[in-house]
């Protein structure tokens, strides 16, 4: 069976573990692959792609975007992603261990969950402009290349500054969409983070509510208020997203996918997919395959 490729870095199955930060130019790796990076994902690595020049077509979990500079592409662990770059592309790919990113965000609160979703962020004048974003990336890279006393502490500080910039841009994008940042929003973001970590283990709303210190009724109210959906629907949508990833990007059987997602009974998994989507996993796989070929 063939699962979705999971790499340390693209095309590399082993991680040397020598450094918690790896950086490279976009060109250095993409040129080796004809400026095309095929769909893959990372297990414990968090990537930030900074596009300075050129053009890119970006796929994040099956959604495709045309990207012009300057821009940040946030790629959390397990996000299926691919890129097609123009030959004149300019920019960097920064790769971190997820725990270092979580530590860097520990003082920002809800940003931990907000930046755990794949997204594309553009500079915003008065929030973080293009020059500030460029400096945040360049200074982090410069510190990584400069061996000196206190380098690790300096790198962590530079990473935190870059993550703060990304967080501010994420909030600016949320405000432009009419989103808020009150208690309900914080509970909703925390819930989404918990779902990302536990959706394979349990679909019980009570489990998530207890982790948040609120009742299932309160959690459902928050989800409907902020996200427009019930808590169970959000959990099931996350399962469906992962199912689509496996159906589209792996050759695992339907039974194997069901087991990975917490459905050991293939018939029950098929009924779940049919109830939520109107058709079973095999029909969905065939439809996704036709879309790719088309």
Image (cartoon, rainbow, N blue to C red):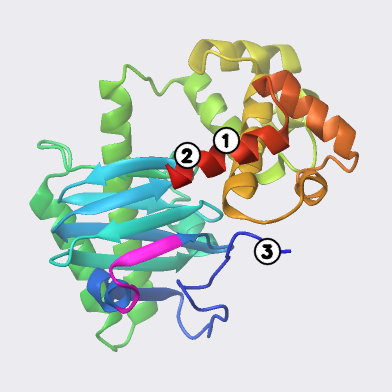
Q: In what quadrant of the picture does the C terminus appear?
A: top left
- Residue drawn at (38%, 75%) of the image: 22
**With respect to residue 18, does 61 lie above or below?**
above
Q: Quadrant of residue 284?
A: top right
Tag 1 and tag 2, C-beta contact below 8 Å: yes
Q: In what quadrant of the picture does the N terminus appear?
A: bottom right
Q: Quadrant of residue 156?
A: bottom left
Residue 80 in percent (x, y) is at: 50, 52
Residue 2 in percent (x, y) is at: 68, 64
Q: Which residues are magenta?
A: 32-38
Question: Could you tell whether 88 is left or right of 285 in the image?
Answer: left
Q: If you read the primary sequence from the N terminus, does the residue marked by circle 2 or circle 3 appear first? A: 3
- Residue drawn at (72%, 55%) of the image: 252
Disc 3 is placed on an element classified as: loop
- Residue drawn at (18%, 68%) of the image: 138
Residue 119 in percent (x, y) is at: 37, 42
Disc 2 is placed on an element classified as: helix
Q: Which residue is mark 3?
A: 2
């Amino acid at each position: 069976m063939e699962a979705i490729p999971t790499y340390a870095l693209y095309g590399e199955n082993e991680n040397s573990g020598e450094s918690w930060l790896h950086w490279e130019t976009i060109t250095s790796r993409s040129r080796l692959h004809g400026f095309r990076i095929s769909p893959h994902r990372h297990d414990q690595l968090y990537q930030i792609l900074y596009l300075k020049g050129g053009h890119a077509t970006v796929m994040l979990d099956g959604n495709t975007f045309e990207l012009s500079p300057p821009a940040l592409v946030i790629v959390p662990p397990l996000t299926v992603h691919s890129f097609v770059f123009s030959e004149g592309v300019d920019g960097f790919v920064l790769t971190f261990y997820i725990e270092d990113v979580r530590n860097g965000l520990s003082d920002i609160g809800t940003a931990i969950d907000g930046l755990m979703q794949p997204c594309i962020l553009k500079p915003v004048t008065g929030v973080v402009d293009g020059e500030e974003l460029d400096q945040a990336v360049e200074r982090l890279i410069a510190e990584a290349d400069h061996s000196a006393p206190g380098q690790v502490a300096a790198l962590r500080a530079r990473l935190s500054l870059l993550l703060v910039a990304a967080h501010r841009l994420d909030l600016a994008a949320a405000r432009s969409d009419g989103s808020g940042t009150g208690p309900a929003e914080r509970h909703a973001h925390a819930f989404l983070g918990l779902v990302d970590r536990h959706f394979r283990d349990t679909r019980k709303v009570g489990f998530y509510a207890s982790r948040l210190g609120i009742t299932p009724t309160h959690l459902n109210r928050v989800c409907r208020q902020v996200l427009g959906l019930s808590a169970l629907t959000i959990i099931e949508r996350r399962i469906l997203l992962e199912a689509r990833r496996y159906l589209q990007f792996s050759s695992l059987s339907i039974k194997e996918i069901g087991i990975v997602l917490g459905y050991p009974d293939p018939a029950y998994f098929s009924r779940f997919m049919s109830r939520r989507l109107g058709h079973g996993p095999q029909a969905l796989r065939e439809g996704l395959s036709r879309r790719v070929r088309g």
